[in-house]
Amino acid sequence: MPNFTVIFAHGRESGPWGTKIRVLAKVAEQLGCRVVSRDDSDNCDPELRVVRLIDEAKSIEGPVVLVGSSMGGYVATVASQTVRPVGLFLMAPALGLPGYANQEPRPVSRELTVVHGWDDDVVPAEPVLAFARKHQAMLHLVPAGHALLEQIDWLPQIFEFFLARCLQFDGNMAKERLLATL
């Protein structure tokens, strides 16, 4: 099995080792993955964060999985076009919000999962639903707010399922999921 690296991209108001990232990083490590959690707390420019994430991923050997929350979800999605990760796991991704250069980012990955809270008061559900529909994502709408902390016990379970699917990577990125995004 290849040596997988899971790269976390945090949201605008959080940091590299917030509650969700700590919980999900533990799952990744238990499955034998290397974990990198980027610290972008020094800037709020999503496009600069995309460039930084791409640069980080270039230095990593082996398959990569991108995980993003809020602004980090947008950043991971845009970066996926260059990084081409095996998987993309998005939590309350900042999609369809004013001030973001790419209003319809195209995800490029074999596995794509989106988790969004029904009670999210930062990112409306509608653009996330449209994104998930357009790109045939595994979509989980849950009773939670933007931070998804009401589901902190459930998130590791769905992340483990997602990551297990990613770990089945056979080196062939020409899978149905990837083809559906092109």
Image: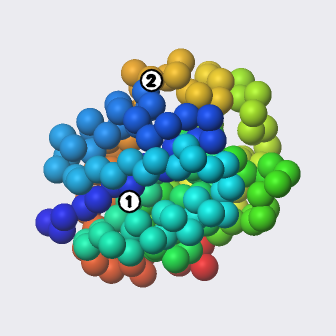
Specify the quadrant that holds the N terminus: bottom left
Question: In what element is the residue under mark 1?
Answer: strand
Q: Residue furthest top?
A: 150
Q: Residue furthest right?
A: 98
- Residue 96 or residue 178, whichever sits in front: 96
Crowd tier of the residue under label 2, counting other residues whose Cα lies within 10 Å: few below 14, some 14–19, many 20 or above = some
- Kind of residue indicated by mark 2: Ile
Q: Where residue 33 sits in the image (x, y, percent)?
A: 22, 52
Q: Are circles 2 and 1 on residues that touch, CB within 8 Å? A: no
Residue 65: numbered disc:
1
Name the residue rendered at 28%, 78% in the picture.
171
- Kind of residue indicated by mark 1: Val
The residue singled out by tag 2 in the image is 152
- Position of residue 107 relative to residue 155, above or below, is below
Of the two numbered discs 2 and 1 on the same chain, state the one appearing first in sequence. 1
Name the residue rendered at 56%, 69% in the picture.
51
Q: Where residue 48 sits in the image (x, y, percent)?
A: 62, 63
Specify the quadrant that holds the C terminus: bottom right
Question: In what element is the residue under mark 2?
Answer: loop
- Position of residue 52 relative to residue 176, above or below, is above
- Position of residue 98 relative to residue 26, above or below, is below
Q: Where residue 180 sits in the image (x, y, percent)?
A: 58, 73
Q: Where residue 2 sits in the image (x, y, percent)?
A: 18, 68
Distance, label 2 to label 1, CA atoms, is 20 Å
